Structure formats: structure tokens, C-alpha cells
Image: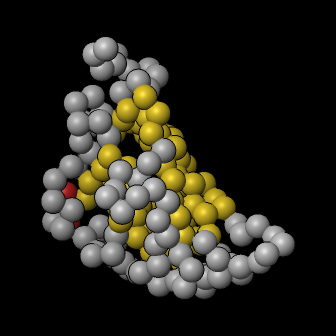
Amino acid sequence: MPGNTDPIYSRIGDVSTNTTTGMGQLITAAANDYTGIGANNVLVFTADATNGGYLQRVRLKAGGTNVASVMRFFINNGTTVGTATNNCFYGEISLPATTASATAATVDMDYTFNIALPAGFKVYAGLGTAVAAGWAMTPIAGKY
């Protein structure tokens, strides 16, 4: 079946982080940058290489006890992320301090994108300050 040539709806859903480290890995190290070139920024979503994709939102889930921080999101044009002119600072969300508990859930939050991305474009994210237990990110997205 060919890709969606007139995308209104996604051809296939995508909730993976598109990394080699696996889905839902906890992020603990700080990138602390506004350009997207920080070594500790991580890949969140990759649009389809031919038809692009749609990123609805990113679900952030605390992995246990963390200090307060911020998660910053960057859109990359599909080329070298280490070059600042290939990245666009898209937005950020404050992350509260969290405490692990055997009887209560840790916070989860959604950062809304609702944007179509061109073919091969990527979304990266990075923490403002390091945290102990980490934050997992799951994109709620689709590929055209």
C-alpha cells in the first residue's frame, strides 16, 4: 500500500521514541541548552522519511523521585543535530519535583504539539537540570 499522498489522517500510528535505546527510556542527564545541540538531548520522534508525520503530543512520566526541572523541545530538519541552525527551539514544560511511592502514582503530563512535520524531520528534547530517577517520554504521533 503506498503512503498517504493527501494526508488528513495518519497512515500508521507511532508511539515509539525512534531510538536504538528502546521505548520509554528514562532521561536523567541535563542538556540545559536553547539551541538543541546539547549532547544530552534525546530523540523523541522521527517523521516518515517519505511522507512526513504528525506529532499530537508527548506524554512525560516521572520515573520516581526527581528534583524540579524543565523539558525543552526542539524541531530538527533531519540533518545534523549538532548544528544549531538545523534546530528550532519549539517549547518547554516545567517538571515538578516528584517522590516515588508504593501507594500513589507519580505525575504524568502531556506537552501538546499538534503539528505536521515534513519528511525526515525529528523532534528532540532535553532536561534543564539533571534528575535522579528520570523522566520517560512517549510521543503520540502518526506517520503519513
Q: Which quadrant holds the C terminus?
A: top left
How many numbered marks have been drawn onto this rendered protein structure? 0
The answer to whether 130 is drawn above or below residue 53 in the figure is below
40 or 75: which is nearer to us?
40
In x, y percent, where is residue 69? 54, 79
- Give the residue at x 24% y 42%: 120
Q: Residue furthest right?
A: 103
Q: Position of residue 17 (x, y in %)?
A: 41, 53
Q: Is residue 102 left or right of residue 19?
A: right
Residue 110's place in the image compared with 116, above or below, is below
Q: Residue visible at 45% across and 60% down?
A: 91
Quadrant hosting residue 88: bottom left
Q: Where 51 falls versus 111 (above or below)? A: above
Q: Residue at x 16, y 53 (%)?
A: 79
Q: Is residue 144 left or right of residue 49?
A: right
Q: Quadrant of the N terminus?
A: top left
Q: Is residue 74 visible?
A: no
Image position of 73 (left or right of 63): left
**Viewer-closest of 137 and 32:** 137
Q: How is the image coloured?
A: secondary structure
Residue shown at the point (60%, 72%) measured from the top left: 63
Q: Is residue 125 visible?
A: yes
- In the rendered structure, the answer to whether residue 3 lies left or right of residue 138 reads left
Q: Position of residue 93 (x, y in %)?
A: 54, 65
- Where is residue 57 drawn, in percent x and y? 53, 47
